[in-house]
């Protein structure tokens, strides 16, 4: 009887150990491919609404950046303000990712995996990217308009703060923005990968916070948050033109996509494929 009880305890212990053990590279990859295939099966309207929601929700990062900038603008120099803003930058990302809304930079590497695995076609990948981008951008435009109106009404920031934030995003030349966007896309692809191996809400929040705080602290360019920042500046400032907005947006999107696809999806998949061949 004692032996049987010991056997059951050992079995339970082994089961718990397996359950708590970190996922392997192949397990994460399989989980990511399965998750992506579910998205491929969704309707266009479902994807558009989810991505529109993401574009709106991530606007809370922009709102908090404006609030923090307004609060510290007379207390410290501008260089320190942007580092402080990195502390609140992750809030919108946490809302989006935990809420399961579809964000372009999180989806680029994820949606590429079924194509590399020959389970989906390239044309379907571009269709999904287009839908997600469209929803994210229009959601961002809507929250920009809301932010510009509500900020002064609540007295938490004014349009000069919006202009300052927008100009800070645009102060680098397009080559720098492009490389910066690649790094941001790389980190966002890693975020998607790391979230798959996280098994609790707390660990997921920590992963999201750490990765996106790094993006904020380094001043890397994120096409969806940047869309809100620059479009808001376009509305309130004569110094920012439609050419500034379109050129930034185009370069940031391409850079983010390259970072997510090449440095995460392709390298992670090829590492698995070569290991399988050997």
Image (spheres, rainbow, N blue to C red):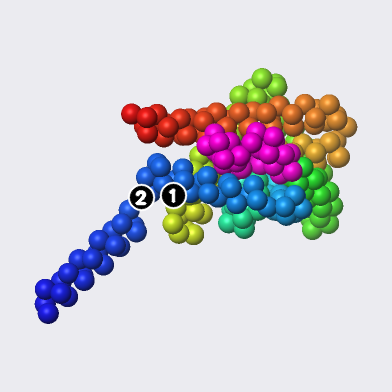
Residue 22, numbered label: 2
Callout 2 touching callout 1 (CB < 8 Å):
yes
**Which of these two is toward me, 128 or 81?**
128
Residue span colored magenta: 104-132
The quarter of the image holding the C terminus is: top left
Instruction: Kindly identify which residue carries mark 1.
Output: 197
- Where residue 9 sits: x, y (%)? 21, 70
Residue lying farthest to the right in this orientation: 238
- Where residue 233 sits: x, y (%)? 80, 38
**Residue depicted at x 77% and y 26%:** 247
Q: Is 59 in the magenta?
A: no
The quarter of the image holding the N terminus is: bottom left
For residue 141, say whether it is visible. Answer: yes
**Residue depicted at x 66% and y 20%:** 175
Residue 27, numbered label: none
Left or right position of 236 against 10: right
- Per the picture, the main secondary structure of the magenta-coloured stretch is helix
Give the secondary structure at mark 2.
loop
Q: Is 110 in the magenta?
A: yes
- Where residue 177 sits: x, y (%)? 66, 26
């Amino acid at each position: 009887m004692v032996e049987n009880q010991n056997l059951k305890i050992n079995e339970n212990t082994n089961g718990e150990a397996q359950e708590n053990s970190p996922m392997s590279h192949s397990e994460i990859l399989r989980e990511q491919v399965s998750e992506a295939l579910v998205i491929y099966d969704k309707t266009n309207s479902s994807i558009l609404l989810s991505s529109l929601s993401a574009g709106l929700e991530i606007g809370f990062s922009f709102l908090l950046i404006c609030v923090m900038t307004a609060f510290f603008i007379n207390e410290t120099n501008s260089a320190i303000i942007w580092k402080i803003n990195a502390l609140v930058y992750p809030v919108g990302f946490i809302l989006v990712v935990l809420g399961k809304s579809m964000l372009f930079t999180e989806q680029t590497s994820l949606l590429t995996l079924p194509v590399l695995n020959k389970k989906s076609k390239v044309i379907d990948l571009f269709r999904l990217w287009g839908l997600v981008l469209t929803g994210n951008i229009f959601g961002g435009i809507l929250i920009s308009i809301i932010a510009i109106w509500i900020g002064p009404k609540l007295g938490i920031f004014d349009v000069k703060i919006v202009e300052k934030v927008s100009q800070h995003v645009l102060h680098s030349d397009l080559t720098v923005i492009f490389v910066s966007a690649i790094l941001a896309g790389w980190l966002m692809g890693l975020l998607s990968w790391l979230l798959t191996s996280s098994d609790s809400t707390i660990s997921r929040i920590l992963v999201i916070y750490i990765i996106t705080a790094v993006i904020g602290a380094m001043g890397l360019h994120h096409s969806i948050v940047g869309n809100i920042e620059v479009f808001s500046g376009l509305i309130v400032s004569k110094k920012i033109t439609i050419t500034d907005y379109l050129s930034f947006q185009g370069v940031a999107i391409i850079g983010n996509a390259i970072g997510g696809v090449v440095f995460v999806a392709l390298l992670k998949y090829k590492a698995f494929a070569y290991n399988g061949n050997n």
